C-alpha cells in the first residue's frame, strides 16, 4: 500500500511501480481543477491494476500548496457537513465531497467501471495520504453507496487523514468495511485539528480504525490498534502543542512526497526521517 499511496505524488505513477511493484500497471491518472477560488488548486487520483495480485487500486494525491490548505479550512467553516448517502444518515465535509465528485465525474468513475468490467473478480484497494486519505474515505463510501462494490471486496488503507465527518458517518464507515485502517504517525498534526464546525453545529469524528505508530515507523517498530479513535488514547495522548508537521510527511520512515516525486527509487534509506 505504501507504494500505491506514494505513487500518487508522481505525474507518472508507473515510475514507482516499475521500481517497487513491477506487476502493477497504471490505467489512468485524472487531474481536475477543484477550486472556484484558486487556479492552482487541483485534485489528483489514479487507477491501476495488478493481474498477479488480482487487484484494482484507486489512489488519491495529498494536498499541495497553501492555497489548497487554505481553501479546505475556508470550505469547512463556510459550508460544514452535509448528507449525501442513502446507506447512512451520517454527514460528511461538503468541500471534501465536492472535491471527490469532481474527480469521480472527471473520469475516475469511467475508469473504475472499465476495470471492474474487465476484471470483475478483482479486489478493490482504496488508499491515499493527507487530503488523499480523506478522498479515499469519501471514495470508498460512495462506491458502496452506489452499489459498485461490496465492502467485503474492498480494502481501505489511509495515512494521515483529517476528520471529515460526524459520528454517524464515522460509525457507519467503521462497521461497513471489514478491512479498514487509518495509519497515523506519532505526532502528525492532522489528528489534532479543530473538531467543532459551528456553521452546521457539527462535531467531527474519526472512524475507529486507527493504527498508531509512536516512533519512526522503521521496520519492526511496534504499533497500537486503537478502538477509541477520538478519546485520550493512542494519537489522542499527544498534546496539540507537541505536534510536528514532519511526522505528517514521513510515513514508514520515508519522506513520502520526496520519494514519490523521485519515482520511488530502490535506495529508500536516502529518504529516511532525520
Image: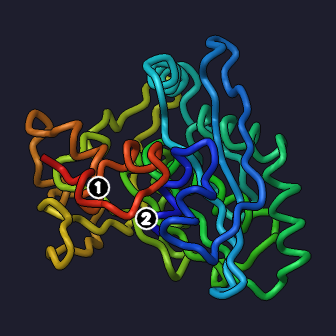
Which labelled disc corresponds to residue 2? 2
Q: Which callout, 2 or 1, points at the residue further toward the start of the chain?
A: 2
In the rendered image, residue 125, in percent from the top left (x then y), is placed at 61, 71
User: In this figure, which residue is indicated by the disc labeled 1?
Assistant: 254
- Gap in angstroms between the C-alphas marked 2 and 1: 10 Å
Q: Nearer the viewer, residue 235 or 61?
A: 61
Q: Nearer the viewer, residue 82 or 216?
A: 216
Q: Is residue 256 above or below residue 49?
A: above
Secondary structure at badge 2 equals helix
Q: Is the Cβ of the residue at disc 2 closer than 8 Å to that at disc 1?
A: yes
Left or right, 120 with reference to 150: right
Residue occupying the point 89% across, 77% down: 118
Which labelled disc corresponds to residue 158? none
The image's colouring method is rainbow
In the rendered image, residue 10, in percent from the top left (x then y), is placed at 55, 45
Residue occupying the point 43% across, 45% down: 130
Residue occupying the point 78% across, 47% down: 104
Q: Is residue 129 above or below residue 78?
A: below
Secondary structure at badge 1 equals strand
Q: Is residue 99 above or below residue 57?
A: above
In the rendered image, residue 222, in percent from the top left (x then y), is placed at 15, 76
- Crowdedness of circle 2 by 10 Å Cα count: few (<14), some, many (20+)? some
In the rendered image, residue 236, in percent from the top left (x then y), is placed at 18, 53
Amino acid at each position: 500500500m505504501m507504494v500505491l499511496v506514494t505513487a500518487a505524488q508522481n505525474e507518472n505513477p508507473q515510475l514507482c511501480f516499475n521500481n517497487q511493484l513491477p506487476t502493477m500497471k497504471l490505467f489512468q491518472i485524472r487531474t481536475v481543477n477543484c477550486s472556484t477560488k484558486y487556479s492552482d488548486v487541483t485534485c489528483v487520483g489514479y487507477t491501476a491494476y495488478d493481474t498477479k495480485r488480482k487487484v484494482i487500486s484507486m489512489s488519491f494525491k495529498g494536498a499541495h500548496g497553501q492555497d489548497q490548505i487554505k481553501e479546505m479550512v475556508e470550505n469547512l467553516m463556510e459550508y460544514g457537513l452535509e448528507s449525501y448517502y442513502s446507506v447512512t444518515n451520517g454527514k460528511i465535509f461538503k468541500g471534501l465531497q465536492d472535491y471527490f465528485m469532481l474527480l469521480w465525474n472527471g473520469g475516475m468513475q469511467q475508469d473504475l467501471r472499465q476495470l471492474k468490467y474487465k476484471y470483475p473478480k478483482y479486489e478493490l484497494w482504496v488508499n491515499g495520504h493527507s487530503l488523499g486519505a480523506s478522498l479515499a474515505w469519501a471514495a470508498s463510501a460512495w462506491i458502496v453507496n452506489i452499489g459498485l462494490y461490496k465492502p467485503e471486496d474492498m480494502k481501505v488503507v489511509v495515512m494521515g487523514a483529517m476528520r471529515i465527518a460526524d459520528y454517524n458517518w464515522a460509525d457507519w464507515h467503521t462497521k461497513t468495511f471489514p478491512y479498514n485502517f487509518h495509519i497515523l504517525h506519532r505526532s502528525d498534526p492532522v489528528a489534532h485539528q479543530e473538531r467543532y464546525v459551528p456553521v452546521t453545529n457539527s462535531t467531527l469524528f474519526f472512524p475507529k480504525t486507527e493504527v498508531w505508530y509512536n516512533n519512526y515507523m522503521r521496520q519492526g517498530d511496534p504499533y497500537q490498534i486503537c478502538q477509541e479513535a477520538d478519546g485520550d488514547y493512542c494519537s489522542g495522548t499527544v498534546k496539540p502543542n507537541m505536534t510536528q508537521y514532519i511526522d505528517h510527511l514521513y510515513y514508514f520512515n520515508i519522506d513520502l512526497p520526496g520519494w514519490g516525486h523521485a519515482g520511488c527509487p530502490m535506495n529508500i534509506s536516502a529518504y529516511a526521517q532525520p
